[in-house]
Amino acid sequence: MKVGLSWDLGGDEPAATQWHRVIGEIERGDALGFDSAWVAEGKTGQAGCAQPAVFMTFAARRTKSIHCRALARSVAGEFPVRLAEEITLLDQFSHGRGGVAYAPASGQKIDPLMVHETIEFIRGAWATNEVRYRGKYVRFPTHTPDDAPAGLSYPAWTGEYLPQWEWGAARSTADFLALTPKPVSTHLPVYVAIDDDETLEWAARNGVSPYAGVNLTTAEAIERLARYRAIADSCGRHSYEVEAVLERNVAIDGASDAHTFGGSSHDITCAIRAAAAATRIGHFVWRYRDAAPNDLERFANEVQTRLQA
Amino acid sequence: MEFWTSFAGQFVLRGFPGAVPQNYDTLVATAVEAERLGFDGVVASEHHFEYNRFLPFPLQALGAAAAATSKIRLITGAMLLPLYDPIRAAEAAATVDILSGGRVTLGLGMGYRPMEFDGIGTAKNTRGARLSEQMEIIRLATSQEHFSFQGKHYEYKDQQLSPTPLQRPIDMWFCGGTSRVGAQRAAAGGFDYWLANSDYDRTKEIVDIYLGLAREAGRPADKLRYALFRDVFVGDTLAEARDARDWFLEVYYNEHIRCYGYLMDDKGEPLFNPPFDHPAYVAFVNSLLCGTPDMVVTELKRFEQLGVHSITVPPVQLELFSKKVLPEFRK
């Protein structure tokens, strides 16, 4: 079981203070052996983190081992190519520790198909050389014709090859383009929030890792993660193809509630183990806020240890 | 006069294959080294879909460099703004500005490669007009609590930028080549103007046009700044300096500048892969400054006297440049 930490930046505290404190917490998490750090996209207030991939690139250069992930990343109003490039660069600057979890369509007030097409395009463009994509919302390159195959398609070998620097004025673009650079990771971790039923089913059928966020109650999260697994199993997809994530608040020596695993470290360990047994999650993420000064150390020493033992 | 340097490691040089993570480590190391050597800023550029894995998002690279440095300015030049949504660009700039303690400078250009517009999904033929509007939007978004903007291409009502940068507004330059059109756009918007490689006479001609047009537009010309990309190659002899230049041409410019439509013919049409003896390419090569340290200092002093704010040099001779040239401008 991997364990991670997540943050949702914002509120009244000035960004300059809050952000550097969080960077310090990520550094501590790295030193204590946490597997991942996630910072959520937020676009409210002076300290909202609208560009989590950029934030995490900074964090990546201050850490050695912890995976650095952009959380709740919107696709609405974004260029899909840029979404692919920002995670590529995060992965490159972190030497293969990058990753992203996309926000649910309902939270962005968009058709779930837009999220699905964007993720399919990004993964396809990372995995191959020249590609094109024709969808309802995503078209790459923009001049891709209406009669191109739906989704990803690839150029046929025609026996001719002209490198870019010899294209000249007559062929200054191409019907298929390659995203460059590519990520370090062969299968860069891509997650999607499974708040929406359409996305839950699509992700399960297409091998996209599910992220059950702290906004869901524990009961909802476990039900949705279990449903995801059942659909994936019915499609013949193995649990090792993806990594299911459950995010919760944690209150060490505090009270549990619908979004919080509380109690002793033993209680918290049992709650995580119970959720894992019901859903086959491989990664637990602690939404980190209002924690006591030594809670990170306690979680690392007491909970993380018990999760492995 | 300030001295800025481009980043090494933004792409894989022809003839020097290497892993991209290693290149990006070099990029960060350039910032650290440039800071140590006394340079004032370090500049990241942008291209897409290029086989040599060119850096596609300069602000993100500056985020990485910010984590390893403490005082050097972190600059984009040129960030191809028409390939962005302006608010997303402002958000990214604000993010790095906060993380770096207010060290971000935006050098913003309009781009020229058809495949980049085609691949990302924005119109190339409106890029000039959009760049001007986008820069105004960023200026408003980074200086006001709430802002509104009504343009031909963009419209915002009572919008708020989140997060807000430390610099209000964020430091920003218009990268417009060395052309009358570029000077016109920069002057009309009241933007500081960052010129492309050019010799002293051409630089002075365009600066005079820029400042004149700014006055005509009612802009405070005495407060406007102008900067220059000026590729400088130093050697103990002129021949050594030219060898350094020729190496850089071979591994980079012969292709990068010549093949993708950066250069223009005398009618203003982009040139793709012109012969090496084409006048536009010859003029470009001749605009690169080569010389002994004394020659280079003498030439650069003329730019200083012209009022140039900063000169951006390539990252190929930083140590030598810092020892032999920089001290003459620090006295």
Image (tube, coloured by chain):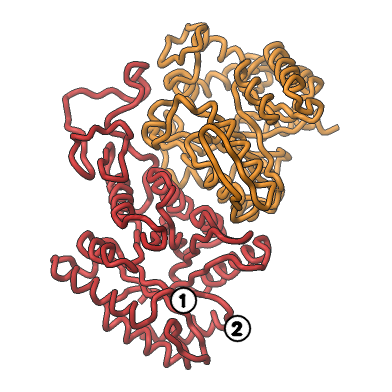
Chain colours: A red, B orange
Q: Quarter of the image for the N terminus of chain A: give it.
A: bottom left
Q: Give me the residue at 16% from left, 26% from top.
A: A158
Q: Which residue is mark 2?
A: A292
* Mark 2 burial class by Cα count in 10 Å: few <14, some 14-19, many 20+: few
Mark 2 belongs to which amino acid?
A: Ala
Tell me the element at label 2: loop
Q: Which residue is mark 1?
A: A286
- The answer to the question of whether label 1 and label 2 lie on touching residues, with beta carbons closer than 8 A, is no
The subunit carrying tag 2 is A
Rendering coords of residue A145 (x, y %): 24, 32
Mark sitting on residue A85? none
Circle 1: residue type:
Trp
Classify 10 Å Cα crowding around label 1: few (below 14), some (14-19), many (20 and above): many
* Viewer-proximal residue among A23 and A112: A112
Rendering coords of residue A259 (x, y %): 44, 81
Q: Is residue A5 above or below residue B92?
A: below
